[in-house]
Image: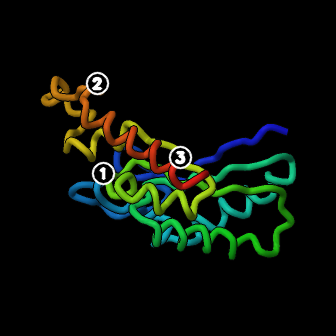
């Protein structure tokens, strides 16, 4: 009876899936991944949505949308999800945004007004906030998770969550 949270596919960047035949990119971490990949390849979202809807009959399900950049993108993808499952018997499904792109964090108040919940993706958020490749040993010395700006961003999101009344 407890909710289960499932994150939609976030492939690309440091995670590859050759069977998806994704294009080679000069900077895949900033390229076609997460929400953008799901927008460009709707069949990937649709098959996940249908499976999740069926699974929700067993108990409450929270769907997490990765790499969201703004309200419009979240609303569009949620609409695509709902359209994909309109003929699938489902239980309770809640829709949430991943806060791992600075633009989403800066727009958190608006996102929390349309999303059921949110989750902070600290690894990607830190990487994008400080322009640092977390897997690059040449700059690993500058990866400081205790940086005050990082925690300020997280506090800002939490205040937005409380302010939005979610």
Instruction: Tell me which numbered mark, 3 or 1, is placed earlier along the sequence.
Output: 1
Measured as percent of width and height from the top left, residue 87 is found at: 81, 75
Closer mark to the observer between disc 2 and disc 1: 2
**Total residue callouts:** 3
Mark seen at residue 158: none
Rendering quarter of residue 127 = top left
Residue 2, relative to residue 113: is it above or below? above
Q: 86 left or right of 151?
A: right
Coloring scheme used: rainbow
Look at mark 1 in the image and give the residue it sits on. 29
Measured as percent of width and height from the top left, residue 79 is found at: 61, 73
Rendering quarter of residue 78 = bottom right
Look at mark 3 in the image and give the residue it sits on. 162
- Bin the neighbour count of mark 3 within 10 Å (Cα to Cα): few under 14, some 14-19, many 20 and up: few
Residue at image x 64%, y 68%?
Answer: 81
Residue 17 in view here = no
Residue at image x 27%, y 33%?
Answer: 135
Look at mark 2 in the image and give the residue it sits on. 146
Residue at image x 25%, y 31%?
Answer: 148
Tag 2 near tag 3, CB within 8 Å: no
Tell me the CA gap for discs 2 and 1: 23 Å
The secondary structure type at the circle numbered 1 is helix
């Amino acid at each position: 009876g407890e909710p289960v949270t499932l994150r939609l596919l976030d492939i690309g960047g440091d995670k590859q899936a050759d069977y998806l035949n994704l294009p080679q990119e000069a900077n895949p971490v900033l390229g076609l991944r997460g929400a953008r990949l799901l927008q460009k390849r709707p069949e990937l979202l649709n098959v996940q949505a249908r499976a999740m809807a069926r699974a929700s009959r067993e108990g409450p399900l929270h769907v997490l949308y990765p790499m969201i950049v703004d309200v419009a993108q979240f609303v569009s993808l949620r609409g695509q999800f709902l359209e994909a499952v309109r003929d699938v018997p489902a239980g309770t499904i809640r829709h949430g945004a991943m806060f791992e792109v600075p633009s989403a964090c800066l727009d958190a108040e608006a996102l929390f007004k349309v999303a059921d919940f949110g989750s902070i993706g600290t690894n990607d958020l830190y990487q994008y906030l400080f322009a640092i490749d977390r897997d690059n040993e040449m700059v690993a010395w500058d990866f400081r998770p205790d940086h005050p700006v990082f925690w300020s961003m997280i506090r800002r999101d939490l205040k937005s969550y409380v302010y939005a009344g979610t």
